[in-house]
Image (spheres, rainbow, N blue to C red):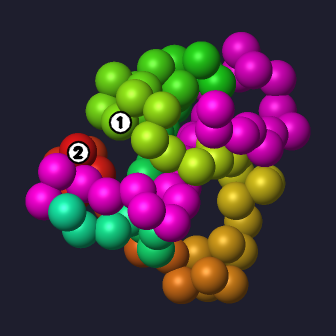
Amino acid sequence: MPLIAHHMPADQKQTWYFTFGYGHENANGERLGDRYFVVKDATFHEARKTIMDLRGTAWGFQYDDASFSGQPEQFGLKEATAEEIR
C-alpha cells in the first residue's frame, strides 16, 4: 500500500502531492518515477480517492505541502496531468 507523509489534520482542505515509484508506468508505457501529481483543495481522503480513481494503488507516496516542499528541485520531479498518469 502506498505510504503517506502529512502534518496537517486529515479533514483540512489543502493541496496534496502524489509521487510514483520505479516501475510505475502510464497506459502508454511511459515511466512515472520522475513525475508527481497534484490534487488541490481536498481533504486527505478526497485527494486519496482522486488518485485511486486514476491509478488504483499504482502510486508511491502522498504528501502535504510541508512534506513535499523542495522535492521537485531535489529529485528533478516534474508535475504531471491526470491524462499523463493514466
Is residue 13 rendered magenta in the image? yes
The amino acid type, in three-letter code, at marker 1 is Arg
| In the rendered image, the vertical position of residue 73 relative to residue 66, given as above or below | below
Residue 16 picture quarter: top right
| In the rendered image, the vertical position of residue 15 relative to residue 26, given as above or below | above
Is residue 7 rendered magenta in the image? yes
Q: Is residue 36 visible?
A: no
Residue 79 picture quarter: bottom left
Figure disc tally: 2
Count neighbours of disc 2 (C-alpha within 10 A) and say few if under 14, some if 14 to 19, many if 20 or more.
some
Rendered location of residue 70, percent (x, y): 71, 74
- Give the residue at the far front of this rendering: 23
- Per the rendered image, the range of residues in magenta is 1-28
Question: Residue at 71% across / 15% down in the picture?
Answer: 11
- Give the residue at the far left of this rendering: 28
Question: Residue at 49% across / 45% down in the picture?
Answer: 59
The amino acid type, in three-letter code, at marker 2 is Arg
- Name the main secondary structure of what is drawn in magenta: loop
Q: Which residue is mark 1?
A: 55
Where disc 2 sits, the SS reads loop
